[in-house]
Amino acid sequence: MAGHSKWANIQHRKGRQDAKRSKMFSKLSKEITVAAKMGAPDPEFNPRLRLAIQAAKAQSMPKDNIDRAIKKSTAADEASFEEIRYEGFGPSGIGVIVEALTDNRNRAASDIRTIFSKNGGNMGETGSVSFMFDLVGYIEYRGDVASEDDMLEAAIEAGADDVQSSEESHDIYCAFDQLADVASALEKTFGEPQTAKPIWKPQNTINVEGDKADSVMKLMNALDDCDDVQNVYANFEISDEDMERLAG
């Protein structure tokens, strides 16, 4: 998971650039709208919406944007989005799970299939990759928010299953259906987290380096740039040296 986590963090830093930031806000808005449409438009009574708003705030999305996204959920002319999961394999045999929110299933499938094939991968059948992952709740705090011991104690007390701490971050994992409760409990102690969302966590990882790492990152970035794609998960591991080279 480390390689994929580093990739995600790099994407967040690149999100400071205007184009990346705009695309990020678009995806966050779409998730807020869908969450509000599927449940109550009040985050107090809608855990998914609460987590979507939390994710948007963590990326400094303006309150006006969040409010507009919620209002869209009740608009009569608002497009109806469908949630679809795609699975496939990338360079070096890595497993990839792609979560999409789209108003055109055929377009999304075609675009994602093309991205896989142009970047050394191929689409698989549903279930061909997901069995190698676990759907869990994921909460992230900056490393300077608390000591490793304090975060571990608070997270376990809140109901989390695992905590992985480093200088940069505290990564907290919990059962998928406990995410909202664990996030809410931790927020009372440490404030709003940088991330709180369900993720597909790989059971094992594949090490990629050198040119192979370049190929993997090219696929990941291409998928992330697709408008219909909301989230991308993969089971690769990249060294700090290669990740720094790629980030530079």
Image: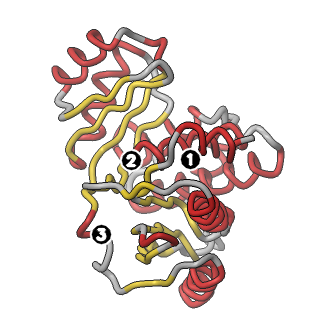
Drawn side of residue 87 relative to residue 7, left or right = left
Asked which secondary structure carries label 1, the reply is helix
User: Residue type at mark 1?
Assistant: Trp
At label 2, which amino acid type do we have? Met
Looking at the image, is mark 3 or mark 1 earlier in the sequence? Answer: 1
In percent of width and height, residue 49 lies at: 44, 47
Colouring convention used in this rendered image of the protein: secondary structure
Q: Which image quadrant is residue 12 in?
A: top right
Q: Are marks 3 and 1 in contact (CB under 8 Å)?
A: no
Instruction: Give me the C-alpha separation between circle 3 and circle 1.
Output: 20 Å
Image vertical order of residue 209 relative to residue 50, above or below? below
Q: Look at discs 3 and 1 and give the one toward the viewer.
A: 1
Q: Nearer the viewer, residue 62 or 237?
A: 237
Left or right: where 79 falls relative to 126: right
Asked if one can make out residue 21 in the rendered structure from this viewpoint, the answer is yes
Residue 42 percent coordinates (x, y): 44, 43
Q: Residue at x 61, y 71 (%)?
A: 228
N-terminal-most mark, 2 or 3: 2
Give 91 or 49, whichever is nearer the viewer. 91
The residue drawn where x is 42% and y is 22% is 166
Mark 2 — residue? 1
Quadrant for the C terminus in the image: top right
Q: Residue at x 42, y 40 (%)?
A: 50
**What type is the residue that disc 3 sits on?**
Ser
Please name the residue that numbered disc 1 is placed on: 7
Residue at label 3?
130
At 41% from the left edge and 38% from the top edge, which residue is drawn?
196
Using the numbered discs, state the Cα–Cα distance from disc 2 to disc 3 in whole angstroms: 15 Å
Q: Earlier in the sequence, mark 2 or mark 1?
A: 2
